[in-house]
Image: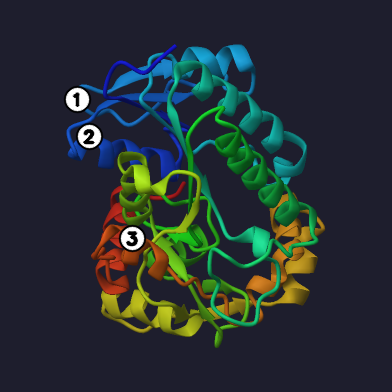
Amino acid sequence: MSAVSDLHVVLGAAGAVGSSVVRELVSRGHRVRAVNRSGRVPALPGVEVHQGDITTTAGAKAACYGAHVVYHCAAPAYDRWVQEFPRMTDAVREGAAASGAKLVFADNLYMYGPVNRPMTEDMPYAARNPMGRVRAEMAEALLAAHRSGELRVAIGRASDYYGPGGINTTVGTTVFAAALAGKVARWVGLLDQPHTLSYLPDIAKGLVTLGDDARADGQAWHLPTAPAVTGRQFLDLVFAELGHPGKTAAVGRPMQRLIGLVNPVVRALGETWYQRDRPFVADTSKFTHTFGPFAATPHTDAIAATLDWCRANPTP
């Protein structure tokens, strides 16, 4: 089917990234269909809600029907990526292609493996761990589909995210909810290494830019964000916004291994510990050189907005 409308379909619309993309699309005046398995998605005027299972080709085709652009923001549970993510992404690719839609994939930086300089889009996919390899293989398959003419594809890559709605992240409840509750705010990894962090509304703005601009097609892009900070600097900014000093600590490798004995998500973090014991910095200049200036949200403003959201949505 050929795309005949301005319909933008967001898969995984109840998740942190997906819900942010829905809001960004609405703010730009696009017609939006929000898709997830439960049907519980952001309640925004004019947004069409679709409940469906996109892990099957039939389900993905139904979800993507009539779309002009499809945003693949869905993901299995973190510790199920290797087993389930490729099959889901294959189904999404087929669903988007059947609609004649462009596919924008919300990706991360795992595929590069250990690095010794800021990451750029032309770096080889050097990851040897299962989670990094599955990310690399999905990106390679999607870009191959673009080259073959099956569909148009653009890939937007972000680092560890935080922001309103960002709970299931290493910079989520262990930092913001803990700080608000007067508990120890814990940074995963070494405190003194610079680390790129992505703010959810900035991720959404970047992904929708890729969806709207044909110059993005057939390539991967690092989405703009505020400059990298160390864990110590980030935690200091959180408590500066709260207006009082707080208790902080690092989750080091020994503690990660110990917690990982009973927590499969924490256990999986061990595969990519090289992101947390040395500089992990993304170079986003390709994006800004191509699409023009991008006003990434300063960490001070992003932290303030995240704390406001956490106050209004306390963790049980």
Q: Nearer the viewer, mark 3 or mark 2?
A: 3
* Residue sitting at x 36%, y 48%: 215
Separation of disc 3 and disc 2 at Cα?
A: 24 Å
Q: Are marks 2 and 1 in contact (CB under 8 Å)?
A: yes
Taking the spot 38% from the left edge, 53% from the top edge, the residue there is: 203
Q: Position of residue 310 (x, y in %)?
A: 34, 54
For mark 3, does the 10 Å Cα neighbourhood hold few (<14), some (14 to 19), or many (20 or more) residues? Answer: few
Q: Position of residue 12 (x, y in %)?
A: 48, 33
- Please identify the quarter of the rendering in which residue 43 is found: top left
User: 313 left or right of 155?
Assistant: left
Under circle 3, the secondary element is helix
Q: Label 1, on which residue?
A: 45
Q: Label 1 crowding class (10 Å Cα cut-off): few <14, some 14-19, many 20+?
A: few
Picture coordinates of residue 305, whole percent (x, y) = 26, 60
Q: Is disc 2 surrounded by few (<14), some (14 to 19) or many (20+) residues within 10 Å?
A: some
Amino acid under disc 2 = Val
> Which residue is rendered at x = 52% and y = 16% of the image?
98
- Which residue is nearer to you in this view: 8 or 195? 8
Tell me the residue that label 2 is attached to: 26
Q: Is residue 151 above or below residue 205?
A: above
Relative horizontal placement of residue 303, taking residue 136 as reference (left or right): left
Regarding mark 2 in the picture, which secondary structure is present there?
Answer: helix
Q: Is residue 161 above or below residue 47?
A: below
Locate residue 263, reporting x and y percent: 74, 53
Q: Is residue 307 left or right of residue 162?
A: left
Which disc is residue 290 wearing? 3
Q: Which label lies toward us, 2 or 1?
A: 2
Comparing 183 with 221, the one in front is 221
Cα distance in 3D space between marks 1 and 3 = 33 Å
